[in-house]
Image (cartoon, coloured by chain):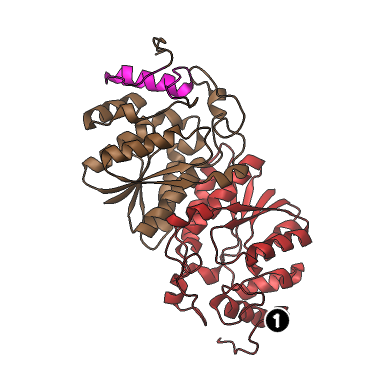
Chain colours: A brown, B red
Amino acid sequence: MKTIVILSGGMDSATLLYAVKSRGDAVKALSVDYGQRHVRELLAASRICEEAGVEHRVADLTALRPFMSGSSQTDDVPVPEGHYTEESMKATVVPNRNMLLLATAAAWAISSKFNCVAYGAHAGDHAIYPDCRESFIATMREAFLNCDWHPIKLEAPFTGMSKADIAKLGGQLGVPFALTYSCYAGREKHCGRCGTCVERREAFQLSGVPDPTAYEIENVPVSM
Amino acid sequence: MKTIVILSGGMDSATLLYAVKSRGDAVKALSVDYGQRHVRELLAASRICEEAGVEHRVADLTALRPFMSGSSQTDDVPVPEGHYTEESMKATVVPNRNMLLLATAAAWAISSKFNCVAYGAHAGDHAIYPDCRESFIATMREAFLNCDWHPIKLEAPFTGMSKADIAKLGGQLGVPFALTYSCYAGREKHCGRCGTCVERREAFQLSGVPDPTAYEIENVPVSM
C-alpha cells in the first residue's frame, strides 16, 4: 500500500505513522496548518518525520479561518483548563476541520498516485468532536472510494481504541514520544493543565509506557 | 432553509443561486480560488452576487496547489480546444477539487449556523469528472449529515439535468447570463473554442434562450 498518514504532531498520529511504516507501506506524512494558536505541533510533526525518515508536507489552510470561526484553537476564546468537560471540549472544535483535513489528504493521494490515507482519530474524541465519530468517518470512507477513478482507502484503525491503548502500541513500535507535542497552551514545555495534557499524562500512566514529557507542573493526580 | 450556494461564476451555479433565492431561502454564496489560471470567473461570481443582492465570499485554496497537481486549470498543461473528448476533459480535472469545495462550504455553513449547501454539478460533467458523479455526491451528502451535531443538507438539484435544461430554467428565473463566465482560456471575451465555450453555446442554442455571450469566434457549428 502507498499511504498518506495525517500527522498532527501528537502521540496518536505519531503512533499511526510508525504502525503504517512497520507494515512496509510507502509512506508520506501530511500536516495541516488551519490557523492553530501555535506552530509547535507542526514542528513536532516535522521532527517526527525526520526521525522516521518520511517525507513531510504542511498544507496551509489558514486562508480558510474566516470560514471556520468559533474555536479556541483558532480564535480568542480562552483555552479550557483541567480534564475536558463536554462544554470545554466543544470550545476547541474547529468547524469541519476533519473533512477539510481528509479532503486535502485525498487530493495529495490522488495527485501522488497513492491509494490509502491513514487517520488517527480515536475513541476518546468521538463523543464530543462530531467529525471524529465513527459514523462520520464511515461516510468519508465511502466518499474516498468515489472521489477519483481509483478508489482511495481511508483507514482509521484507532477509532475503537483508547489513548492508553495507543500509547501501549506506540511503546511497542518505538515511537519517539519525546518528540510529540499535545499541549493546547503552546509553550515550550507541556503545560500539564489543559485537557490534552491531562489526557496525555493519563494515557502514559494507564499504559505503563514511560512518559518522557517535560511538564510545567508535575504530580497532578490522574482522575480515573 | 439557510443555504450556502457554491458559485463558480458559470451559468449553472448562477442558475442555482437564482433558483434557491426564488424559493425564499436565506442565501450566501461561496466561490473557491484553487489557483485557477485566471480570476475572471471569480469576478463574474462577484458581479452576479451584486446583481442578486447576495453576500459573496471567496475561499483562498491556492496554498493547496502543491497537493493538487496535474490539471490544465492550475498547471502548465495546455488548455484543450474543441468539444471535449474524454482525454481532453481528464486534463482539466483538479484532484479532489469538489471534496475540498464541499468541505469548505460545509465549514462556512456550520460556523454561520446555516443548514444547507447547494451545489450545481450536472449530468454533463458526471461521466468524466469523478467527483461530479452522483455516486460521489451521494457519499458527500451522508458526510454532511454527520460532520456536525446539526445535519447539513447537501442539495445538487442539477445532477439529472443537461446544460440546456439548466439554461432553460435560468432563462425562466431571469438569471443575468451576460454576467456569467465559462471560458477556460480566460480572456475578456469567451474564446468560443474551448470545451466549456462549445458547451455553453450549445446549451443556449438547444434551450432556445438568447445567448448574450460575446465570443471571439462566432458561427461555430454545434455538433448535436
Residue A71 lies, in percent from the top left, at: 58, 33
Q: Residues within 10 Å of mark 1 (few under 14, many from 20)?
A: few
Q: Residue B129: within the magenta?
A: no
Residue at point 71% right, 52% down? B27
Q: How many marks?
A: 1
Instruction: Evaluate whether residue A158 shows in this view.
Output: no
Does residue A96 appear left or right of residue A188 in this picture? right
Label 1 marks a residue whose chain is B
Q: Is residue B142 placed above or below B219 in the rendered structure?
A: above
Residue B127 lies, in percent from the top left, at: 46, 70
> Label 1 is placed on what type of residue?
Gly
Q: Which residue is mark 1?
A: B208
Q: Is residue A88 placed above or below A104 in the rendered structure?
A: above
Of residue A2 and residue B133, the one placed in the foreground of this image is: A2
Residue at point 47% right, 35% down? A39
Locate the C terminus of chain A by quadrant.
Answer: top left
Residue at point 68% right, 69% down? B180
Q: Which residues are magenta?
A: A188-215
Which quadrant holds residue B91? bottom left
Q: Is residue A150 placed above or below B2 in the rendered structure?
A: below
